[in-house]
Image (tube, rainbow, N blue to C red):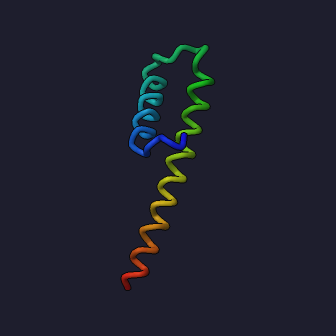
Amino acid sequence: MEKLSYTSAKKELESIVSAIEAGEMDVDLLIDKVKRASELIIFCKEKLTKTEKELQKILDDIV
């Protein structure tokens, strides 16, 4: 997932969620898609946390 961007991860996650909500998910694929969604959520959360810390450091340096 190192090459994955936040935007592409978010889009993939939204696609998985939409398919599940619409009932379009094949039961045989459901567990794999839920695992993938979990990985994407962790990736996005870490990316947001890292970005927030970097922004805060930049703002702290300005003041």
On-image quarter of the N terminus: top right
Whether residue 46 is situated above or below residue 37 in the rendered picture: below
Q: Position of residue 14 (x, y in %)?
A: 42, 34
Q: What is the number of callouts on the image?
A: 0
Residue drawn at (50%, 47%) of the image: 44
Instruction: Say left or right for 9 vs 37.
Output: left
Residue drawn at (61%, 31%) of the image: 35
Residue drawn at (57%, 32%) of the image: 36
Q: Position of residue 16 (x, y in %)?
A: 47, 28
Using the rendered view, name the quadrant where residue 59 is placed. bottom left
Whether residue 43 is situated above or below residue 32 in the rendered picture: below
Whether residue 48 is situated above or below residue 31 in the rendered picture: below
Q: Where is residue 60 in the image (x, y as percent from the top left)?
A: 43, 80
Q: Which residue lies furthest to the bottom in this view?
A: 63
Instruction: Say left or right for 5 vs 38.
Output: left
On-image quarter of the C terminus: bottom left
Residue drawn at (46%, 74%) of the image: 57
